[in-house]
Every structure is written in C-alpha cells, then in structure tokens.
Amino acid sequence: MQQTGHYAERLARVRQMMTEQQLDALLCYGNPFRKDYLRYVHPAPTPSPYGFCLLTREGGTLFVESPWDRLPPAETVQEVVGARSPSGVAQAVAAKVRQLGVGPRLGLAGGEVMESEFYDTLREHLGGSELVPASKAVMDLRYVKDAAELAAIRRAAAIADEGWKTFVATCRPGVPQYEVTARCEGLVRELGAEDNFMIMSSGTTDVYGMTPPSSRRLERGDSVLTEFTPQADGYYAQLCRSLTVGPPSAAQRQSFDIFKRAADAALAMIRPGVTAADIARAENAVFESEGYGEYCTAQYTRVRGHGMGLHFDEDPMIWEDVEFPIRAGMVLIPHPNTYLPLAGYMVFGDAILVTETGCELLTKTERILFQAGDS
Amino acid sequence: MKRGLIEWNPEELPREVLDGRVARCQALLAERGLDAALCYTSVAQPGLSRYFVHFLPYWNEGVLVLPRDGAPMLCVGLSNRVFPWIKGSSTLTEIRASRNLGADAARVLQERGARRVGLADRGSIPHRVIAELQAGLPGGEVVDLPQVVQALGLGLDPDELRLRTAAGQRVAAALAEAGGAPGGSTDSALAAALDRAVRLAGAEDTVVLVGPAGQWPGLPRQVPLSGPTNVMMQVEYKGHWVQVGRALGANGQASAAAAALGGLCQPGHTVREIVAAARDEQGLDAYLSRSGRGNPFVGLAENDRLAEGDIVAVLALQTGGDGLLSGDTFAVQAGGARALST
C-alpha cells in the first residue's frame, strides 16, 4: 500500500526492515511504562493504558481498550479495534492476525515489557504465526530521527527551557521540593507537554543522587538539581541544570566548573564516527585530571549520558564500555552527572542533535550555575 | 509519570497496617504450601509493592520477594544510590540492584531454599521476567497466586478506603477550584490547573483528559475551550488511585447520572448487566474498570462479575442530549456501592 502523509517515509523504512528481517507483519506494543515502540508506528497519543499496532505490508490497525477506540487514530492506521478488557484486546489482535492470514513470522516490538496475560493470549490464539523479537530492528530505525521527530524534540526542548525558568523562580528557602515540581509540571502541561520525567534533589554533600521530590524544604546554601524532561508530540528532550539557593559557595563554584568542563569536552568531540565510549572517556578525563576519577564509576553515577526520543532514556548509554558508533541525526544528552565531595551530587547537560560536522544544542538555557532568590 | 510527592507517612499509614498485610500474605502462603510470593512492580504497576511495603517506583521496575518467613526484599532496576530513598519511603530493609529481575529473584529464592513460589497476579508480570524466573529455578515449582489482595480476606480494608477517599477529596477540591470550564482558555491550561492543584495537595501522579461535550475526552492539545467540557481525572495519592469523570460548565447536569452509576454497582452483578442498565435506564454508554493486578485500573469484560470488596471505576458518556461525561470510583459493598471520589 502506498502511504501518504507525514509518516510515509517512516512507514516505508519500517516495511523495508520487515522485508529484510523476513517479517510477514509487525506488532508494536506499548503500556504506561514504555509506549515508545507503539508510538513510533502510531504517532498519535492514546489514553488507553496499553495498545498494539499491527502493521502489514498493506496497512495498519490499532488495538486499544474501549472507549479509547472512539478517539481519532494516527494516519498510519486504517482501522481501530477496541475491547473492554486486556484479554479482549489481545484476542482481537490474534483474531485480526488470523483473519489477514499473516504468515509464520510476526515481528514483536516492545515485547520486553509485555505482560504475560497479553503474551500468553497471543501465543494461544495466533494460529500459525510465531512471535519473532523485533525490538532491536525497530530501535535501529529509531536512532536517527526524521524531520517530524526532530520538530517534536525541538518543541520539547523549548518547553524544557521554559520549565527551567519556573524551576528557578520557584526555588526559595522554605519551599518544599514537591511544590517546585508541581509548579513546573503545571507549566509544561500548559505549554502542551504530554508528560515530563523529572527528578530532583536539594542539599549539599549529603546528596548522592536524584529522586522524586520530597517534603524537604529548600534552605539557603542548598544546591538544587533537576533532570527536566518534557514530552511533546511523543518525544522527550532533557535539560540538566543545577542552581544554588543564594550565592554559591566556593566549593559549589569549583564543583560546577568541573561539570561544565566535562560537558564541554563531550560537546567538543561529538561528531559522526565517535563512539558512546569516546564521549564518556572525554567527560571522565576532566574529572580524572582534577583527582576525582573514582566518582565516574557506577558507585557514584549511573551513566554519562544517553540517547533520547520516544523514550527519555534511550540507547545508546554513554558509558566507557559502550562502543556504539554515533551517527548524524541522533539525539543525545551527554551529562556528566555524579557525586563529588566538593558540593555533593550535581547535574549539567543539554539535549543535542548530532550533525554531519559536530553537534547542535537543542536546549537554549544558559550554560551556567544558576542562582535562585534567597528572600 | 510519578513526579509528585512520594513519601511514606507512618502517621497516615501506620507500620502495623503494612506489616499486618505481609503477615496475612505469609499465612496465605503457608495455607497454600508456598515458600514465597513474587510481586512485580513498576512505575506503571506499583499496586502490590505499595500495598505490602509502600514501595512506589518513580521509574523502572522491580520484583518484591515476599517469603513465608522473614522480611520482604526487593530486586529493583534502580541504582544503589537511591536505596536510601527506597528505605526511607517504604518498610524495606533489604534491596538488591538488578538488571535481570527474574533471574535475580530466582537467585534470592534459591539462597533462601524456596522451591514452590506463587506469582502474585501472574497476568500483570512481563513474560520475560517469568521466563527468567523459571529458567533460574530448575526443579522449582512456579504457580499462580491470583487476586492476592482479595485472597487475604481483608474485604474493604479501612486503611485502603481512607486513603482512596483522601485521593478522591483532592480530585473534588481541584475540580471545584476549576469551576466551570474557563472560557477563552485551552484544554491544556485546564489540565495544567487541575494537575497543579492535586500535586500541591500531595498527589504523586495524575492523568487528565479533556474534550468537548459530546465526545470522550483525550489528551490535551492546546485546543481552545468553548461550552461544556468533559474531563476525566485519574489521581494517585500515596499509591491509591481514583478516577472521576465530570462535565464542567454544564451546571451539574451529569451529577444525577454519576450518582446513579453507583447504584448499579452491586455485588454479584455482571458488567453486562450494569452496562445494559446504564444504557436503558440512564442513557449512558458506560465502561467499568477495577483496581487490581498492580495497575491503577484494569478494564472489565462484559462477563466479569463484581464482588464485595472490589474497587471499581465507572466512566460514562450520555448517548443523547449534550453528551456529558460522568463517573466515579466506588467501593463495592453489600447493599450498594460507596463513592470514594465525591
């Protein structure tokens, strides 16, 4: 089937992959934990807590929980099927597969998070089709973003920039952490964000990482940090910034300088052909030169950055043993976030687009250690 | 996604309540000849780990191992740097970082000599976790432990009802604050105001859907509001979800229909019967979902039958007239349902 519209090229790539992988059809699954594979082939959001999109060479069908089948689907599908319960939805998928006479190899993307009720029902009712893991093949397509994807990520990045302004404006002594996130959350929703992954922390050398907000009230002298990750049109963009409540101490300034230089080192070397490991090494070299190499290990930090797109924490992970070659068109966030004994955990990083010659910052927030009011 | 306040307040939910649930589960395991129960948990399905140990993952996933004897322990995809937070917001004392939840849970079970293991609400567990678990327990027996919370025999747990009601009160207050759908505003601005209000009141998660009367609501798209507006809110407070449907700017026209829905949710009634009654008596196209399986709400099929102790959410759209949305969350009990969100 000749697909027209915004997603014609994407669907053509997916169907080309299906041919190469000898898949007779592709089933993409999503639930509230991970909807990214579903969203890749069905770009419109669905409030259904879970859903499937079945792509054949001829067309597509969306399967969701009722009544959410009454909402308009994306242009990538020609039919929407609803059922009242999870087993009803899974049986509807299987019935469609049988009705279409799909061949023996049915690719499954997003199966890693699929609950056994769905998986077992599909296996039982699919007839002659076998579920073939296809997440990796679809993820290979997702690394390099197309024009529509980049437009969404740029929109998410702009919302992150606005959200950070609210974050700074809200951080005052006496304000509880959860009030800060509530006000940021409200702002990003007002600007059209669908979702927002946001963790934070406040304090000094007692802070070893970020968590959901607590009822702890901000104090003068705190470092306050956040990963701010709005989702627009399905795509996430992340901004990592730190601020101090009141003027920064010498230790906070010294610590931030190390993070800034590490992030700059990553930005300076990112271009097609380098690996995720190269980026991690560039960041870590700055810490090592200051005598803080041990704080680049898993005891103190999770990763030195990661990809992003339909999921806020996509591969490739930026880590010293990930020899993944970076390509033009990928969206990453190199962030040397870790604990340092100088001023505790600190974060700093920007969403970037890898270009043919280097990278472009997608977030536009000033790259400094911010200072929030202390009144 | 959970970005709100996730804290355990022992004054609000005493330690004895959580420990009592664990003890009841351990008695159930002994009764059924099981060495341990496994409860899957994730940012999307935190219900079981919240119920037993008050662990609410803000991201990622985990498996709670609840042994027949001794304290529960957690295998979790979160980094060890946040273990202090987990310990501070739950009753957990033993936690292991895990990249392969099923395999690591199997290792824990082997270390403890557990051979016969019950999968709590098996259908909600990712099949890959079950496959890893089975591969890691050669010679062991993995059996289903369905509807584990209901099987504890606590019926309508008063602490559960109290916190669900607290969630419902937050929704009601936010909707009252929003008043009618503000003319000149957008669906996104309305959703933002509701979201902000419940988070400032301590909610950890929300879903807000908005749409014009006559339609099922959807995700806000910065569309200007005009006239009566249908709103669906799901709100999580201390892990307790409620769902509400309302028509704003409709002068309360849908409230009678919403109240009538509760009257239909009787123990023993099937979803088919309730849906038919809603259609024939109230002119409503109704959908029911039940809290369980670790999820906030799971859609119920027409053959499903309500039982005393169920927490169900009903969402309904007028099939005629103005197409107004209504719905509440109910505790099903003998003699009728009790609304938790009005």
Image (cartoon, rainbow, N blue to C red):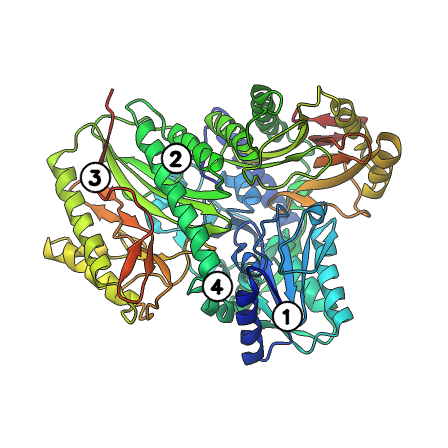
Looking at the rendered structure, the kind of residue marked 2 is Pro
Looking at the rendered structure, the kind of residue marked 1 is Gln
Image height of A331 relative to A108, above or below: above
> What residue is drawn where x is 72% and y is 45%?
A67
Q: Position of residue B164 (x, y in %)?
A: 60, 29
SS under mark 4: helix
> The numbered mark 1 sits on a residue in which chain?
A
> For the residue carrying disc 1, how many other residues have a C-alpha within 10 Å: few (<14), some (14-19), or many (20+)?
few
Q: Which residue corresponds to mark 2?
A: A213
User: Of label 1 and label 3, which has the lower sequence position?
Assistant: 1
Q: Residue A121's quadrant in the figure?
A: bottom right
> For the residue carrying disc 4, how many other residues have a C-alpha within 10 Å: few (<14), some (14-19), or many (20+)?
many
Q: Which residue corresponds to mark 3?
A: A369
Nearer the viewer's eye, disc 4 or disc 2? 2
Where the N terminus of chain A falls, by quadrant?
bottom right
> What residue is drawn where x is 59% and y is 26%?
B171
Between the C-alphas of marks 3 and 4, the distance is: 43 Å
Q: Tell me whether marks 4 and 2 sit on the same chain.
A: no
**In front here: A169 or B133?**
A169
> What residue is drawn where x is 74% and y is 52%?
A83
Contact (CB < 8 A) between labels 1 and 3?
A: no
Looking at the rendered structure, the kind of residue marked 3 is Leu
SS under mark 1: loop
Any part of residue A264 in sight = yes
> The numbered mark 3 sits on a residue in which chain?
A
Marker disc for residue B103: 4
Looking at the rendered structure, the kind of residue marked 4 is Ala
Between the C-alphas of marks 1 and 3, the distance is: 51 Å
SS under mark 3: loop
Q: Position of residue A139 (x, y in %)?
A: 47, 66
Q: Which residue corresponds to mark 1?
A: A2
**Relative to A30, A172 lies left or right:** left
